[in-house]
Image (cartoon, rainbow, N blue to C red):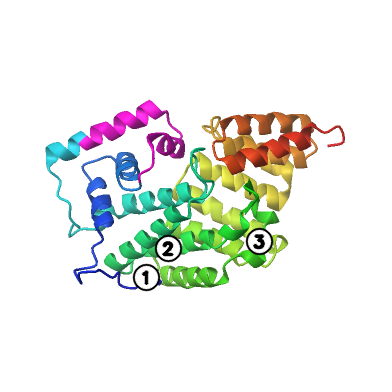
Amino acid sequence: MYLTEPTSDNDQEPEDERLRLILLCCHPALALDTQVALTLRLVAGLTTEEIAAAYLIPVPTLAARITRAKKKIRRSAIPLSIPDQLATRLDAVLRVIYLVFNEGYLSRSARTEVHRVDLCDEAIRLTDIVAYVAEDHAETLGLAALLRFTHARRDARFSDDELVLLDRQDRSRWRLDEIQAANRLLHRAMKLMQPGATQTEAVIASYHANARTAGDTDWARITALYDQLLAMRPSPVVALNRAISIAMSDGPPAGLAALAEIDGLDDYHLFHAARGELEFRNGQTQQAHGSFARAHELAQNPAERTYLAARLTETNRPDA
């Protein structure tokens, strides 16, 4: 069911209790990053370690932030209700849902399964509820599209608990009905003429999802979209994705040059994994081995660690 009125056993208003709790945690009296962290802990049930990994910050820092937020909510007696001015909390709510989905899409905790479909499904369900309550909100529709574009690939993303990269996935296993639903949602969002970063991410995802083969992907256009996204929401992770798209469009040397300009990702495993991949494709086998080793050291997800271990073996071969 896509963006229809949520149902209730007692025929009350479609005000989902979990959404109420999210809105409590996303009170504007709290800093935005604190709102997101608190909601992930109390509503999504993620561990402090998982949330800290998502934020790329130390666990003690995150734990102290959550503790302070709980105390502030108790002192302020913030009500558990959907506010009249829902728009004041939507940015935080959408960020929370996105991070819940990301944790399900590729868990950062080695204690859980590599892919938690339950969290992905819950994130999509919550997005539908928000889209119903906040009617014609372009960024919410953009998130609904983005999550479906991404979730549609779930059956092709793993092989024997090893990660399968996008360009090597069996696209016949992608869920076409979900891609088509995402296309419709993105079209609705774009018609509202309210540009936003989440919609831009959804457009990028649409280029991947609608390409018949990996070779059909319009990497030049994706790079241009990442330029737009960096202007809207600057972050080193967006810059990393842009560097990868540059490499796919213009070759590994151009991608490595773009990676060299990024600061703040020394402890982020995907930065080192991407650099290792580009170094390997550029014939820099020894450097690639070092980058994959650092990525393997930092990675927590079992599927990613298995993939990186295989890349380490490959770059260590005499004929690599």
Residue type (three-letter) at the residue carrying disc 1: Leu
- What secondary structure do most residues of the magenta stretch adopt? helix
Q: Quadrant of residue 212?
A: bottom right
Could you say which is closer to the camera, residue 23 or residue 116?
Answer: 116
In-image side of 205 versus 215 (left or right): left
Q: Is residue 130 above or below residue 294?
A: below
Q: Can residue 197 be seen in this snapshot? A: no
Q: Which element type, helix, strand or loop, lies under badge 1?
A: loop
Give yes or no for residue 53 being in the magenta stretch: yes
The structure residue drawn at horizontal position 35% and vertical position 48%, both measured from the top left corner, is: 44
Q: Which element type, helix, strand or loop, lies under badge 2?
A: helix
The residue that label 1 is drawn on is: 3
Which of the numbered marks, if any, corresponds to residue 144? Answer: 2
Could you say which is closer to the camera, residue 119 or residue 147?
Answer: 119
The quadrant of the rendering that contains the C terminus is: top right
Q: Quadrant of residue 255?
A: top right
The residue that label 3 is drawn on is: 218
Which residues are the magenta region? Answer: 45-70
Circle 3 packing at 10 Å, graded few (<14), some (14-19), many (20+), is some
The structure residue drawn at horizontal position 55% and vertical position 40%, both measured from the top left corner, is: 301
In the rendering, at what x and y percent does residue 27 appear?
22, 47
Could you say which is closer to the camera, residue 229 or residue 207?
Answer: 207
The structure residue drawn at horizontal position 41% and vertical position 60%, both measured from the top left corner, is: 124
In-image side of 273 versus 200 (left or right): right
Q: CA distance from mark 1 to mark 2?
A: 9 Å
The quadrant of the rendering that contains the N terminus is: bottom left
In the rendering, at what x and y percent does residue 170 appear?
68, 61
In-image side of 199 versus 42 (left or right): right
Residue type (three-letter) at the residue carrying disc 3: Asp
Q: Is residue 31 above or below residue 145?
A: above
Circle 2 packing at 10 Å, graded few (<14), some (14-19), many (20+), is many
Q: Given contact means CB atoms under 8 Å apart, are the residues at marks 1 and 2 in contact? A: yes
